[in-house]
Amino acid sequence: MFEQSGRDERIRTSGPCVPNAVLYQAELLPDLLAFAVQRMWCVDYMAVRFTVQAIASEPCKSACVILRQPDLVEHMTRAVYHLHNIWLENDGLIPGQHYEQQYLDLMRQIWTQGDERIDRTGVGTRAIFGVTMRFDLADDAIPLLTTKRVFWKTAAREMLWFLTGDTNIRELVKQKVHIWTDWPLDKYRKETGEQLDRDTFEQRIIDDDVFAAKWGDLGPVYGKQWVDWPRYMPVGEGLYRREEKGINQIALLIEGIRNNPGSRRHIFTGWNVAELDQMALPPCHKTYQFYVSGGKLSGLLYQRSCDLGLGFAFNVFSAAMLIRMIAQQCDLEPGELVWNGGDVHLYLNHADLVEEQITREPSGAPKLKIFGKPDSIFDYEIGDFEVQDYEPQSHISAPVAV
């Protein structure tokens, strides 16, 4: 079996296909083996052999001495290949590893090896392309980051707001949710020249209906597309009329999972190409797909753009929460969340956040409890949710790039 009781502990392997001599090799190369396995360098046997030979060139004296002996290269190949199989059998996690470690490893990889790029905001990022992480949701597990405090109720309120189809920040700021304020505030400052602070702007949004209607709307973002995707009907002579009520993708999704669980079409998306230019921000967490197996519901989120330092913590919690809600509505148990990132990046002005967070050790196993079962996916309220056993380390602040 495989054991890892800490970042500096040794890795041990055993099993009928792994020679005892390999134990000695693994003792000398714990970090390099873990590095190879965690990053999926090992795709097939020949790829593993190449990886092991490459490790020999690392500036590690003991590694070089051992791996320059051909017979031991073969033993090491078998060892890494065995560890990789264990890695696959455990959904991409090394057994015993905290679910958050994959996130911290990714953060470190991007910060030290990412492609430095000029982005839309002008701040600049370090990025990589194409990432997958998996999170088990069984037994009420919820992938909340523990190496910094995540204000989960803010993420939950946002998800519930999405499901209403609302696009104005007014209802959010009434609940002291500020995560969408920067975009309309930036627009207001640019168009009027008045440098209102955030609190004053939000108070005017709450107090003044006309002001809120003009300056608080974000355009047809997320929830609007989820529950009211535009529908057009022909009226003759090549003309079309937009229907008052659009397509409710969420309602159709629930119906589909209940009535045809084996379908490969359990999908909803916010990426409406015709309306992207009307949105304050095109959807980052753009497409969700669901999969039913063995009485469990799993969900896959494809996120085209991910601010790993700030946004990811909310995105992964919200996606897991949504899977839980849909599973409950469809009388299924939660399975897992599969998270796919396209352009996964860290902003250059997040150096303090990154360098502090990657030094912290994740711990604990928070749970998300849902009290009661509403009649509809659209009837949940914030009081229906409670996170338990969450003892995070201190919050780390960083600026939002607009």
Image (spheres, rainbow, N blue to C red):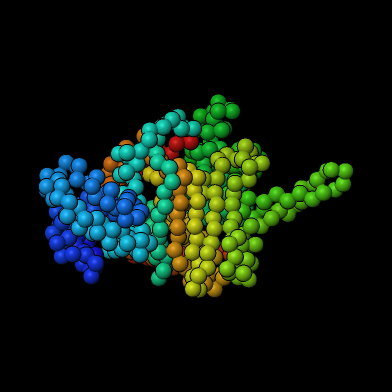
**Is residue 283 shown left or right of residue 395?**
right
- The quarter of the picture where residue 367 lies is bottom left
Nearest the eye: 185 or 350: 350
**Is residue 182 shown left or right of residue 275?**
left
- The quarter of the picture where residue 14 lies is bottom left
Residue shown at 69% from the left, 55% from the top: 247
Task: Residue 91: tell me if it is visible.
Answer: yes
Residue shown at 57% from the left, 39% from the top: 280
Most distant residue in the front direction: 70
Residue shown at 34% from the left, 45% from the top: 107
Q: Where is residue 321 in the image (x, y as percent from the top left)?
A: 48, 61
Q: Position of residue 44 (x, y in %)?
A: 35, 55
On screen, residue 307 above or below 71: above
Q: Where is residue 189 in the image (x, y as percent from the top left)?
A: 54, 30
Most distant residue in the top direction: 193
Q: Position of residue 84 (x, y in %)?
A: 31, 58
Q: In which quarter of the image is the N terminus?
A: bottom left
Residue shown at 59% from the left, 49% from the top: 270
Nearest the eye: 362 or 15: 15
**Is residue 126 shown left or right of residue 167?**
left
On screen, residue 295 above or below 69: below
Task: Residue 368: tell me if it is visible.
Answer: no
**Is residue 184 shown left or right of residue 70?**
right
Most distant residue in the right direction: 237
On screen, residue 370 above or below 309: below
On screen, residue 227 above or below 187: below
Nearest the eye: 371 or 328: 328
Q: How many marks?
A: 0
